[in-house]
Image (cartoon, grey):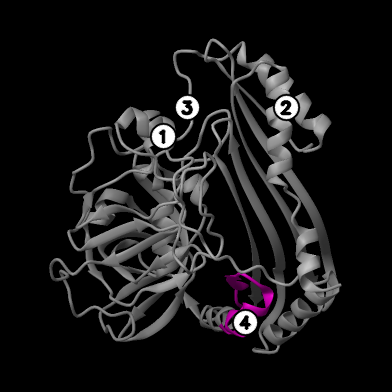
Amino acid sequence: MNNSIANQQIFKLDSEYLNSLLKKYSYESEIKKWDMGASSSRDLSVQVQQGNAKQLKGSQRNSMTLRVWNKYNQVGITTTSDLTSDGINKAMRGAIEASLFGNEKESPEFSPLAKSEIEEITSKISNPHSIDELLTILKNAEKQLLDTHQSIDSVPYNGLNETYIERIYINSEGANRHMKLSQSSIYLYAKAQEENKKPRSAGSIRIKSSIDELDIKSCINETSNKLISHLKYKSIDTKKYLVCFTPEAFLQLINAFSSMFNARSIIDGLSLMKEDSIGDQISVSNLDISDEGLHPENVGAFSFDGEGTPTQNIKLISKGILTNLLHSEATARKFGVKPTGHAGLGAKVSVSPDWLIVSNNGSENDKNESLNVKDTLNEFILIDELSAIHSGVKASQGSFSLPFDGWIVNDGKKTSIDAATVAGDILFVLKSIVKIENEQIVTHQGISPHVWVENMSITGEA
């Protein structure tokens, strides 16, 4: 079987067929206004343990969300995984019944941009691999990682994944969006232990459009190097420290408080920001943060959101000032702006960021220009990864208390920290930044440089 035929068989959605069915059933039901978002994914994943297959999974998932507006402008919503003619007919009837309970005073509308010109993304569609091929690749990666150091005794968490995803959006006014992509990832999380020492662990992840593009060697090396650096550790004193967040850690922190930029969260009272916060200075003036779902490094990028709105790159913080918010159709209408292409489709439309990019705009000098993660001799804490995000963050209050993996660095020497917690307030962090390094580093969740913050409260654990 050639690759083009194989790829055709992987993707399942036929937008013209679904459109014709929805037109037929809406006409029969006297429904004049409707829209539908559907997605389909085909996923293969493997896990290994000590050279043997631990888990092999293959799945095909379909889902569709259908919204209908009755003659009273009440909206009914149904979700189904049955994309056959009979399944869509049932979904239409269910949505019509649900519309009788809709709130006619707060009715969502079509996005005004659902039919506008879209920036096409040239998505690479990888050649499909067999589950045996995935298993062989991951077994070799596990063995190579175990061989890098005698103290590494296992790779308890690992996975190699190949996914094919497609998404469509159709509405009764003629909008018709359709896009497909492939995505592959490898995750390695190893454990090591030396005599009379606590077990230590570290991990790394790589994501690309295809398995052939994955830099598995660098994933192995990063996992091994991190883990080896954690073997010799010590406890630290509880006090305030100069802290350097790695790009991964800083993006974790910003994503944990992304409700600051979320118009839906602001309306619901679940954000630090208010409806009139646009224009407020919320960080040091040389910090820029944007959401750029269309960035070439974002291998999971779709050109439109759940409402059919084109994905857009949005500047969220410019020179330290809150400049824009992420909007769905409903929140944009309330704020008197255009939707930004960040909405999901559901009973209550959600809004979320795509791909955050942190940068130094150079508008003013850093408070401490001499700081550099590679050369600084001052004592500081290097935070590599934050844990317990869901339980340790109070997004609506701005506070956080999070365990972390990292090192204490003194005179350029890194020593792993036994166990510690970093606590603070996100607005304090943003206004206490003393250095934003220039080198931007691509991670699996966005792009950021190393970011330095002074007077961070660190609690060491004996």
Between residue 462 and residue 327, name the one nearer to us. Answer: 327
- Residue type beneath disc 3: Glu
Measured Cα–Cα span from mark 4 to mark 3: 49 Å
In the image, what residue occupies the spot 43% across and 34% down?
Answer: 329
Q: Quadrant of the N terminus?
A: bottom right
Q: Mark 4 points at which residue?
A: 220
**SS at mark 3 in the image:** loop
Discs 3/2, front: 2
Determine which quarter of the picture holds residue 134: bottom right
> Left or right: where does residue 151 sit relative to residue 343?
right
Q: How crowded is mark 2: few (under 14 residues within 10 Å), some or many (20 or more)?
A: few
Discs 2/1, front: 2
Between residue 423 and residue 42, name the one nearer to us. Answer: 42
Q: Mark 3 points at which residue?
A: 109
Q: Residues within 10 Å of mark 4 (few under 14, many from 20)?
A: many
Q: Mark 2 points at which residue?
A: 24
**SS at mark 1 in the image:** helix
Q: Is residue 55 magenta?
A: no
Q: Of label 3 and label 2, which has the lower sequence position? A: 2
Measured Cα–Cα span from mark 1 to mark 3: 15 Å
Between residue 430 and residue 355, name the one nearer to us. Answer: 355
In the image, what residue occupies the spot 64% across and 65% down?
Answer: 183
> Range of the magenta residues?
196-221
- Does residue 307 appear in this view? yes
Instruction: Tell me residue 421's x, y (percent).
Output: 43, 58
**SS at mark 2 in the image:** helix
